[in-house]
Image (cartoon, grey):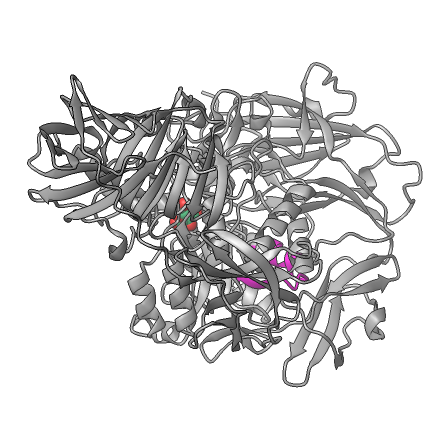
Amino acid sequence: MTSRTPATGYVEDVSPGRGTLPPRAWYASSDAASLSLNGGWRLRVSPTADAEDDAFAEPGFDAGSWAEVTVPGHWVLQGHGAPVYTNHLYPFPVDPPRVPAENPTGDHLRVFDLPGDWPDGGDTVLRLDGVESCARVWLNGTDIGEFKGSRLPHEFAVGHLLKPSGNVLAVRVHQWSAGSYLEDQDQWWLPGIFRDVTLLHRPPGAAGDFFVHASYDHVTGAGTLRVDSGVPGRVTVPELGIDTGTGEAVTLPVEPWTAETPRLYDGVLATAGERVPVRVGFRTVVVEDGLIKVNGTPLLFKGVNRHEWHPRTGRALDLDTMREDVLLMKRHNLNAVRTSHYPPHPAFLRLCDEYGLWVIDECDLETHGFVEQDWRDNPVDDDRWTPALLDRAARMVERDKNHPSVVMWSLGNEAGTGRGLTAMAEWIHGRDPSRPVHYEGDIGCRDTDVYSRMYPPHEEVERIGRGLDGGTHRRRGLPLILCEYAHAMGNGPGGLTEYQELFERYDRLQGGFVWEWIDHGVEHPELGFAYGGDFGEELHDANFVCDGLLLPDRTPSPGLREYKKVIEPVRIEAGDAAGTVRITNRYDFADLSGLEFVFSHQVDGIPTGAHRLTVPALAPGESAEVKLPGAPDGRGEEVQWTVQVLLAEDTPWAGQGHEVAWGQGTVAPRAPLPAAAGVRPAVDGDRIALGPAEFDARTGAVRSLSGVPVKDLRLDVWRATTDNDDGASWQTDTRYGPLWRESGLHRMRHRLDAVETDGDALTVRTRVAPAGRETGLRTVYRWTSDGTRVRLTVSVVPEGDWRMPLPRLGIRFGLAGTPEDAVFWYGGGNEAYPDTRAASRDLLWDASVGELQTPYVRPQENGAHADVRWAEVGGLRVDGDPEFWFTVRPWTTEHLDAARHRTDLVPGDTVWVHLDHRLHGIGSQSCGPGPLPRYHLWPEPVEFSFVFSQPRD
Ligand code: GAL
């Protein structure tokens, strides 16, 4: 009998690796040479870790027949194998630290020459910034080591192995390793060398590692700078006149760094061997009096969770994409990012320093799949894994410690509890006492400095705000942040306004981080964007990977625009005195001097001309009432005021005139609609004429309005359920999406009871109900006309034992049309539902039918507009009494409901128009709570009207 010990034992070894250099700060030297090894590499993918020997690493190996891939990149997104998506389930049997024999292994080869001017002497370091999940590295045939820790840098000393030309760098990457057990984040499993590979010359006397300590004393206005460096040197900051030795503290007046005022001072650390640019931001973070304070001021996080994502390149992001993320965040009023759930590419943190975002830097750690076995054998509670955990903590902290934007360290995500986490927290506290430590799983806050939760309902957040949530003594003295809330999957999230109100009401609530920034849809030729299951995965979690505020191509979703409005840094409301507005500065640090205020009245949605409003440069938290210019006489028309808050000057993240906030109010309400009655219905054979409307005499169905053919006008209660309607399987509260479907709300039958022409009305009586149920909606359509206009009044009376709210309540009909057809309306502008309507601004709008579709990756209900007074579509004008929710689609709700991907939706020759009296809220139940009760659409007797006419010119 023979036993075979594979040379790949390191793959299943719990240790972090072998041969790497100690972690250190990540920086780009201004004078030491470096060589990027990004670009085309040769690749061979094998099905198992040990399918091939290591001959490929030898110089002279002919890889001419191998494929080419781009590094940084994931081979599964470059035509070799396929991505796999699971939320928390490990996509392999859980038997730590063992991994499956089927372990796709990518041998990567790159041959390179050193530039002619590569310096002699010193050393050279090979840095790999991110490899998933385990790599073994050879240079010129010498095995230099192996490592795990996918989203963390690893360096090797390689100077002694380099030649002027023909260097062979061989990297064997295994998709699965012991490290995979620590990397069970909710995302695609994407093997590869997905961050930069760089050769860094280290001259004699190079800086090595250094730690910039730059604090700010808000009482004295002084900053203190001390740069600790393993290699002594001098620190200069010309703007501040600083020229001092490493290890020496200098205190002097400075402008502090905050996310709102990201003041950086450029300096240089000069050692004997190199000059290193440092960007110094002075700020002090403390948890004090139960609050997280920066520079003495409590923060309110208006944050988002950011995974790294690009629909073509996965987690291999270029600088432009990172910058785009930061710019989009700043332009949408976000002030904070949690780097869920691993340290991002280091360049992202530089951008956060520069543009100003508070960062919770999270370690590359999640062991969520162990929940399936009640957390038995969880690596974070097994001492054998502790070195790997400490290695990860150190690699994060050492790499990122010099970023002023990083205000908190996070141990990781959803890894249960255990001694390993405590060890990480202790190590971090010891190494960097200047930043609080976060970990949501530490429910008693034993190891952590803030109380953190995910997805609590509003009511519980309020209880925590009031200090009535109990918990350990230590926890009771700590602030709360919601490291995740408001699940932005598909349409939504709902309820943001109410969370923000709580955050603003209770000091202890220091804001939160919406889940999440971007949909991780994979660009796909047939499907538009692919999600879990589209690559034939055995286990997967479908479109749970598409739950961002950006669509995969970085188009902002209506949810992002909603969030922008909810967290706007200036609040504008009607003032107490008539003709005034109250303006409140909701920044934590900045005054309003960088903003200008533009005011206009609008009459029936049409602005009457803009004026500048003079507003004092209010300090944070201050309010002022400002008088508005006199309103025009509406003479029966609706008059509103709108104040826009715009950037007064160009900023690095948006130009002058960019809108940061707005407010709107009513001066004179809309006049009631005319009755539109007087003409009598006339029966003529199989038709009934009523003014400009024609009906089927037998069924009472409208055939045309104002000469426009109308198809299937009737009561509608169904919507293509949203991800938030469907909810997550683990939710214990009622999930209405499945209940609606089970109850047949998607297959309502319309029974005709009577068609009556008496007096000046045509009345059609019906009962709308699903097969198999006693519940129904008695629905009466009453039509009248004044000869030019036609008025429809719909009365609905529920019958039976309704145990659930309705998705929607309104009418739907079809008009001949295409996606290119223009639509005009007066009412709200952004997609809105009852609990997602903060950003709905009244104006006169126009768009094509196609543009009114929000292309959520998994098609679902979308595109409603709130408070619509009137709309014109397909040659018809509709005025609402009262205002209505307006939606148009180039396909039916049934098509939308059946579609799995965008590409399943093909427009026909009919435009479907929804005029809804009410809609059910959206909520966040795809991971969090459902809509607040006040946004439930409970059946009750209602009546609502529409007046149809020809469009006005
Ligand atoms: C959280 C988790 C996230 C993500 C989210 C749902 O529990 O921390 O990684 O899975 O749920 O989208």
Instruction: Give the x, y percent position of residue 250.
Output: 77, 78
Res. 338 in view:
yes
On whether residue 398 falls in the magenta region, the answer is yes
Q: Where is residue 739 in the image (x, y as percent from the top left)?
A: 19, 39
Residue 98 lies in what quarter of the image?
Answer: top left
Question: In this orientation, which residue lies closer to the viewer: 689 or 124?
Answer: 689
Left or right: where does residue 734 sit relative to residue 479?
A: left
- Magenta-colored span: 393-409
Residue at 71% x, 27% y is: 41
Relative to 447, does residue 817 appear above or below in the rendering? above
Q: Position of residue 25 (x, y in %)?
A: 70, 57
Which of 443 and 203 lies nearest the eye of the viewer? 443
Direction from residue 745 to residue 861 in the image, left or right: right
Q: In this view, does 306 lie above or below 312?
A: below
Residue at 78%, 52% in the rendered image: 28
Location of the N terminus by quadrant is top left
Q: In which quarter of the image is residue 743?
A: top left
Magenta segment includes 624: no
